[in-house]
Amino acid sequence: MNKEDRIPLFVYLLALILVFTGIGGLYGGYSFITAPDGSKLQMDTDILSNSPFNTFMFPGIILLIFNGILPILVVWGLFVKPPWQWPEIFSLYHKQHWCWTFALYYGLILIIWINVQIMLLGYSSLLQPIFALTGVFIVILTLIPSVTKYYKKYN
């Protein structure tokens, strides 16, 4: 195996963080969808009073898709590197494999998700800054040169 063929150590750290946040997104999204009143997570719909939502159903769907399914799909892509062409439609970085681009997107999605949550609902948990910083960390790990080089499509 060539040195260039080895998965960089930072990819494993990136994958670990993505799996952790993905599991949380799957659990939270599923909990909100199956109990839109927030009862499964011991949350009250009163905190939604400054948001466009009356229940947690729609936020749960968004959470499940973008903070649950997406990062798990990205982790799979980071290790398998499937040659799919359809994700390229959404890619701004055509010289990079789509999984690298989507890892970067997910970091930004997580940062935006938490900031919008704080704007609409207010600061309510220590988890908010932790997940915002997790998003920043995902972006940083994705942009580390060895990670970027490993997912470059054209040499």
Image: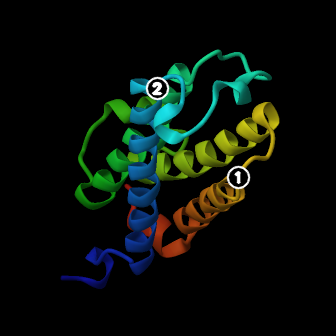
Instruction: Looking at the picture, tell me which residue is in the foreground, 110 or 56.
Output: 56
Instruction: Looking at the picture, tell me which residue is in the foreground, 127 or 155.
Output: 127
* Whether residue 86 is situated above or below residue 110 in the rendered picture: above
The spot of residue 78 in percent (x, y) is 33, 58
> Mark 2 vs mark 1: which is more N-terminal?
2
Which amino acid does the dot numbered 1 rest on? Answer: Ser
Q: Secondary structure at mark 2?
A: helix
The spot of residue 131 in percent (x, y) is 62, 56
Label 2 to label 1: alpha-carbon separation: 21 Å
Of badges 2 and 1, the one in the foreground is 1
**Which residue is located at x 42 percent, y 59 percent?**
20
Q: Which residue is mark 1?
A: 125
**Which residue is located at x 49 percent, y 65 percent?**
148
Please indicate, yes or no, whether residue 95 appears anywhere in the rendered image: no
Q: Secondary structure at mark 1?
A: loop
Which residue ends up furthest to the left in the rendered image? 1
Q: Quadrant location of residue 1?
A: bottom left
Label pair 2/1, CB-CB below 8 angstroms: no
23 relative position to 139: left or right: left
The spot of residue 28 in percent (x, y) is 46, 40
Counting other residues with Cα less than 10 Å from the Cα at mark 2, is it few (<14), some (14-19), or many (20 or more)? Answer: many
Which amino acid does the dot numbered 2 rest on? Answer: Ile
Counting other residues with Cα less than 10 Å from the Cα at mark 1, is it few (<14), some (14-19), or many (20 or more)? Answer: few
Q: Which residue is mark 2?
A: 61
Q: Quadrant of the C terminus?
A: bottom left
Q: Quadrant location of residue 135?
A: bottom right
Instruction: Looking at the picture, tell me which residue is in the foreground, 40 or 54.
Output: 40
* Whether residue 43 is situated above or below residue 33 in the rendered picture: below
The spot of residue 147 in percent (x, y) is 46, 69
